[in-house]
Every structure is written in structure tokens, then in C-alpha cells.
Image (tube, helix red, strand yellow):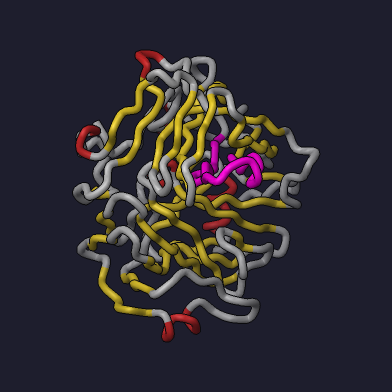
Amino acid sequence: MSAAPSTNGTLPRQAIARLIESRAVTLAMPAAPGQFQPSSIDLRLGTQAFRIRASFLPQPGETVASKLDDLILHRFDLTGGAVLETGCVYLVPLLETLALPPDLAATASPKSSTGRLDVFTRVIADGVPAFDQMPAGYRGTLYAEICPQTFPILVRTGSRLTQIRFRRGPAPDSRARIVDLSVDLASLTGGLIGYRAKRHTGVIDLDKPGAYDIADFWEPIHQGKGRGRLILDPNQFYILASKEAVTVPPDEAAEMVPFNPLVGEFRVHYAGFFDPGFGMSGGGARAVLEVRSHTVPFILEHGQTIGRLVYEPMTERPDVLYGADLGSNYQGQGLKLGKHFR
């Protein structure tokens, strides 16, 4: 086994494979086809799930398991599949566990298809009082906290809602390359500027791409008299697109982060990872924005800055890039719903 390079940055898929060989990452079941991405690995749901009373975080020194006795409403098996209802909070131990070396930390994020279904998903680790963060040297179990917001979903053992990246060295700081993203509410073709999720729909099976009609789950939003403006209704979920075309070079990875929490009462950050090679074919791809307003109606204007991409170097170039080599779902995308819709 070749030695891992010492360069700081995000590890590519071949370096993640080395982590598995060295048991820094342990898979309870053999890797699934397509589980490795250019700069991350998908995390898979385990064999059982817990419906819990509320979201929580363990404090330093506490395990997640030690908190569950007071929180579990019921437990159920996932091997044959189970429906997760909207508005409920679930906790699922994952098939992947970590024994990271002292110079390696990890960060998790929902997969793009998970974010586009308005499934609020975060990873919890023992003794870590922050979501989606595994500090350098972390050793232990990983758990997915799952709360479907709009659509009930069907999942099973092996379903992949989240992904994890590994970083050597410090997180990007103010010196990192940053690109601001604005919302496109005027220039998309055919007058279509977005989609609003319908309520009280059927169940979506997370493991069945291309299985559902758009009209059964989404209302299209077209330009109207308020051209270049959209009023977000409270607690409604929208799919919009960035005005800018995004590219991620082969030697970099990127993550979408909120532009500024003080500029509006809405959320735009569900699935944040952008892989090396994203948008490189065809002159770039739009970033899809998963937007939810909070307690008050909020007006979005065409060109308003609502997010930013923070770029970080790779420790080495991935052996496979995002795009045709992986059969990637969103390469060259414009305004696009998740892969589950036809």
C-alpha cells in the first residue's frame, strides 16, 4: 500500500480507499457500486432505526447511545425497508465507522439528491457537540439524524442519504478562494424559474431514480408580472438555480456555505459538496439552490447573492472526476430536480 501524501487539503477517492485498507474507515458491509465519489464516500444506513422525540447533540465525553434511553419512541428494522414520515425525527446507526489518524478530520453533508427532496439530514458522532463534524483522530460510530420535511420517504439498509469528506490540515479560512452565488429569477429558458414542492404527496423511494412524475410532487414557477422577483412563502420548499455557471477544477473541491445569515430569513444550504470536475464539460453547470423560508414571507430578487462556494485544494488529483466517468446525475445541469423524477 502506497503511503498517503502529506499535502493539506481534501482527500480524493483513491486516498479514501487507502483509509479503508488501513482500517481508518471500516465498512460493515462490502462497498456498494457507486459509493465512492471523486472527493467523498457515501454513508449507508444500517439495519435498525430509532424514532426519537427530538434532535440532540452529545456533549464531550458522552456517547450517542447513552442519550437514547430518554429519547427513543420506538425502534424498527430497516432491512426490509421502512417509511420515514414528515415532521418526525429519526436516528440511524451507519454502516461506516471511523478510526481516524491524528492528522485527519472529516466533514459530512447530505447528498445532492437528498437535499433536493427536502430531507433534513445530519451526521452525529460520539462526544462531538456539532453536527456533521468528526475531529482529527475521531474513533467511533456515526449516526444519521433524518427528518423529512415535505415528502415521506422509503429507505432501507444501505440507502445513502449523506456523504463524508476527509481533510488533512486546517479548514479553509478567509484566504481560501471564494465565489459568491446569486439566484436566477429571470434568465432561464421558457420562463421557468423554479419549482415549489407540493404537500400531502405519496412516498418517494430513495433507491428508485427516475420513478416519479414531476407533476405529482412539484408546482412549476414561471416568470409573471413580478419578473425577477419571487416571494417565498413561510415553511415552503423551493428548487431554484444560480445565475452563475459553476466549475470545480480537477485539483480542487468546493462546498456551498450560506452567504450571510443576516441577509434573510431563509435557508439555502442543504447539500453542500461539489466534486472535482463538476461543470468542467460544457462550460459550467448551475448550482441548484434548495431554499426554504422560515417564519415570514421573504422576497428574493433576481441576482441577489444568497450563497457562496468555498474552494479547497485536493491532496492529489482524483483518479476519476465528476461527470461521464461516474455517470453523474447533475453534470452540466441547469434548473434540475433530483434524480428520482422523470
**Tally of marks:** 0
Q: Main secondary structure of the magenta part?
A: loop
| Residue displayed at 61% across by 43% down | 258
Rendered image quadrant of residue 341: top left
Q: Is residue 132 above or below residue 36?
A: below
Residue 231 on image: x %, y %: 45, 34
Q: Is residue 221 above or below residue 115?
A: above
The quadrant of the picture occupied by the C terminus is top left
Residue 168 on image: x %, y %: 70, 52
Using residue 236 as the reference point, say whether residue 285 is left or right of it: right
Q: Is residue 216 visible?
A: yes
Residue 152 on image: x %, y %: 27, 54
Pick the residue in front: 117 or 163.
117
Residue 123 on image: x %, y %: 50, 61
Using residue 44 as the reference point, say whether residue 219 is left or right of it: left
| Residue displayed at 70% across by 44% down | 9
| Residue displayed at 68% across by 58% down | 104
Q: Is residue 13 visible?
A: no
Pick the residue in front: 261 or 103.
261
Using residue 108 as the reference point, say whether residue 44 is left or right of it: left
| Residue displayed at 24% across by 44% down | 208
Q: Is residue 182 magenta?
A: no
Q: Is residue 247 above or below residue 82?
A: above
Rendered image quadrant of residue 315: top right
Stretch in magenta: 256-275
Q: Is residue 264 magenta?
A: yes
